[in-house]
Amino acid sequence: MNANNQIHHKRHLRGSWIATVINLDWPSTASQKIVDQTERVRVQKSELIAMLDEAVDLRMNALFFQVKPCSDAFYRSSILPWSSYLTGTLGKDPGFDPLQFVIDEAHRRNLELHAWFNPYRVSMNTRQSTIDQLTSVLPGAPVSVYAAHPQWIGVASDRFVLDPGIPEARAWVVEGIMEVARNYDIDGIQFDDYFYNESSSSKLNDDATFALHGQNFSSKADWRRNNTFQLISELSQALRQFNPAIKFGISPAGVWRNKSDDPQGSDTSAGIPNFDAAFADTRRWVHEELIDYIAPQVYWSFGLKAAQFDIVTRWWADTVQGKNVHLYIGEALYKVAVPSQREPEWTQDNGVSQINKQLAWNIDIPQIQGSLLFRHLFLRAPAVLPAIASLREEVWRSVALVPTMPWKGGSAPAPPACVQQIGTLAGTQVKWHESAANPPGKTCYYALYRFPKGQPVDITRAEYLVATCRRDECLHVWTDPVQHDGEVTYAVTALDRGHFESAATTAA
C-alpha cells in the first residue's frame, strides 16, 4: 500500500493517549518536585498546552487523558484522593484542576477529550512505602480505597488491585466514573486493558470471593468474565441514562482469542488474549453494543507471524461489521525506530514505512474509523521524528472530522450565514455569522474548506478541508496565513457536538 496514492477520507478519528501513571507523559517528574505551587502549576499547565498544540499540528481531533491511574484522581473528587503524580503526595491539592483545564484547552482547539480510567488498579507496587502512603492521606482529602475498604483489596502482578468479583467494589468503580460524567464536560469515557491483570508469579487470590459469589458458575474463569461483563454493562447503562451523548469505549489488548482456542478467534498465537487472560469478553461487548467504540492495542507489525497487523485488524473489522460500535486501532508509536529481532520492520526506513503503512491501512479498511497513537511523548522522541514528519506530509496531510455515531443522537445545524472572504496583509480573512435559525448551543464548531477558483464546492472532498474552528460568539473570523489573491473560494459548514455537518455556505 502506498500512502501517497491513498484515497483521502474526511471522517477519521485521530488521537493520542496521554499517560499520567508514573508520570509517563504528564506531568513531568521535574515539575512534580517544584516547591512553589504557583510555579509548579504554571509549568504543568504549559506542559499540557504544548501537548495540545502538538496534537493540532499533527491534525489530530481527539485526546485520551488518563484521569485515574491508580484509584487516585487528576480531577476534583469527593471519592478519590488527588494523585501523588501531581505533587508527590497522595491527597495534596495541586492548586488547579487538571481535567477541567485540559477539557477547556482541548475544546478551545476543537479536540475531543476522553477521560481514560484504569478501573481496578490501586498501586504500582506493594512496597511498605506505598502502603504508608495509601494509609496516610492528608487530612480533609478523601481516604484511599486501600484504607477505606481493605476487604476489597488483593494483589496481582505485584500491585494492589480491587477484587473485580466483589459487587460493592464494582459499584464503587462505576460511581467514581459517574462523578466525572456528572461534573465535567467530557466527550467520552475510556477503559484500558487492565481488568484481571495478573502475572505468572503474582496471581489474584480470589478463591474466597468465588466461593461467596460464584455459586452459579461452573468455573472460576466464567465467573470472572461475568464480573467484567457486569462492570461494562452497569457503567454503559448508567452513562446512557445520564447523558446518551457521552461516548463509552474500551482499549483492550489486540487479540480477543486465538483460533487454536476458539474457531471464532483470529488466526494468531497471542500470549495474552482478552478472553483468556484478562477475562474480558470484548467480542461480546461489541455484539451486544454495550460500548460505542473499541480501540484494540494492535501493537505489532505486518511481519509478526504470531499476530500480524493486517490479520488482527481485519478480524476486528469483521467483528464490528453491522454493529453500532466504532473501531479505532491502537498504534505502537513507541516501537518506531526501536531495534527488534522479532519485528525488524520497525527499524526499516527508521520505521517510517511501517507506521505509515499501518495508518494508511486503517484509512483504507471501511470498518476502521480511527487511529490512536501510544503514547503522546513519543511524538518528541528523536528517532521517531522522521516518522512524524512523514505522517504529517502524507497519511495525515489533510484535516479530518470525527466520525458521527448516529445511535448517540444529533443532527446537522443550519448552515452559517453571511460568509465573506477578504484579503489582508496577514493573509485571507474569512468571516461568518452563526445562523439565527439554530437554537442556542446547537452549533459546536465550524469546518472551513478552500477550493481553487472555478472548482465546484464539494465538501465530500477531504483534500479541501483546511481547518475547524470552535464556535465562540455570533461573529467568527478565521485567517488563512496564505494570501491567495482571489485564486480560491472558501466555504464554511456548521457541525453539532455529534459531528453532524450542515450544507456549506460559500463566501460572497
Image: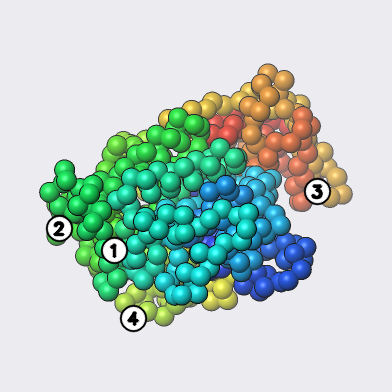
Establish if 269 lies above or below 14: below
Establish if 141 lies above or below 306: above
Report the quarter where the C terminus lies.
top right
For the point 57% across and 62% down, the residue is 137
N-term-proximal mark, 2 vs 1? 1
- From the image, state whether disc 2 or disc 1 is nearer to you: 1
N-term-proximal mark, 3 vs 2? 2
Task: Note whether residue 228 is visible.
Answer: no
Query: In the image, residue 404 lies at what x, y percent?
Result: 48, 36
N-term-proximal mark, 1 vs 4? 1
Q: Which residue is mark 3?
A: 427
Based on the displayed image, in which of its 4 quarters is residue 157 positioned?
bottom left
Direction from residue 201 to residue 174 in the image, left or right: right
Look at label 4 and name its amino acid.
Gln
Report the quarter where the N terminus lies.
bottom left
Tag 1's secondary structure? Answer: loop
Q: Which residue is mark 1?
A: 204
For the point 60% across and 51% down, the residue is 75
